[in-house]
Amino acid sequence: FGSSRSGSGPHVQSASSSYAPSGVSSAMGKLHTISRGYRHGTRNKYAKKYRTKGMPGVARYLATFKRGDYVDIVVDSSVQKGMPFSFYHGRTGVVFNVNRNALGVEMTKIVGNRQLRKRIHVNIAHVRKSRCNESFLKRVKENDQKKRDAKIQGKEIKCKREPEGPKPMKIVKADEDEVEVLAPLPFVENYF
């Protein structure tokens, strides 16, 4: 009597939209993209410590750097200009170029089984002088002084560091009465 099967009646539901809420497809595929931006994964790495928030002080900008200096790259998240990529945060390199607002820093990066030489320019706010070769420079100064003193006295001096050798021998003496021989107790089988 004129009933058409093409339209869905009040009791008929399509299988695809049976339980899906409005606006979401039933094929629950990729709901969101994982963002891989330039600063991804730096929530804690770039977070500033307690009571150090805000812009850096003037002393940070007044530090003098020369070519050949060792510097540590420590990103200051309050300064976005000249910020290096997150991989270089905490790395130590050598200054190869000095500009008005930035430093050229050279360092090595391990990629696979080889070391690549990386050269990047970093804003001065993200750089601080490294203390990695302080002890070496101090030792050089002390050795030079020792050499000068030895030359005046007409002596030869060794400036090489030598590893600590084995301890000197010693003989342990004891009376026979004091010696106590330790031996394991004999095994006794008990069958009860």
Image (tube, rainbow, N blue to C red):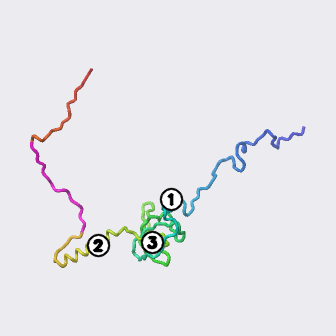
What's the amino acid at mark 1?
Answer: Asn
- Count the numbered circles shown: 3
Locate the C terminus and report the quarter of the image it occupies: top left
- Left or right of residue 54: residue 93: left
Q: Image point 16% across, 77% down: which residue? A: 154
- Left or right of residue 155: residue 72: right
User: Mark 3 or mark 2: which comes first in sequence?
Assistant: 3
Q: Is the magenta stretch mostly helix, strand or loop?
A: loop
User: Mark 1 or mark 2: which comes first in sequence?
Assistant: 1
What's the amino acid at mark 3?
Answer: Val
Q: Which of marks 3 and 2 is in front?
A: 2
Locate the N terminus and report the quarter of the image it occupies: top right
Q: Image point 24% across, 25% down: which residue? A: 189
What's the amino acid at mark 2?
Answer: Val
10 Å neighbourhood of mark 1: few (<14), some, or many (≥20)?
A: few
User: Mark 1 or mark 3: which comes first in sequence?
Assistant: 1
Compared with residue 7, is residue 138 higher up or lower down, i.e. above or below?
Answer: below
> Which residue is label 3 attached to?
105
Q: Which of marks 1 and 3 is in front?
A: 1
Q: How far apart are marks 1 and 3 (CA)?
A: 24 Å
What element does badge 3 sit on?
A: strand
Res. 165 image quadrant: bottom left
Q: Image point 24% across, 68% down: which residue? A: 160
> Which residue is label 1 attached to?
44
Single out the residue that lies furthest toward the top.
192
What number is the disc on residue 140?
2
Residue 21 picture location, percent across and down: 71, 46
Asked if the magenta segment contains residue 28, the reply would be no
The segment highlighted magenta reads 160-175
10 Å neighbourhood of mark 2: few (<14), some, or many (≥20)?
A: few
> Foreground residue, 50 or 46?
50
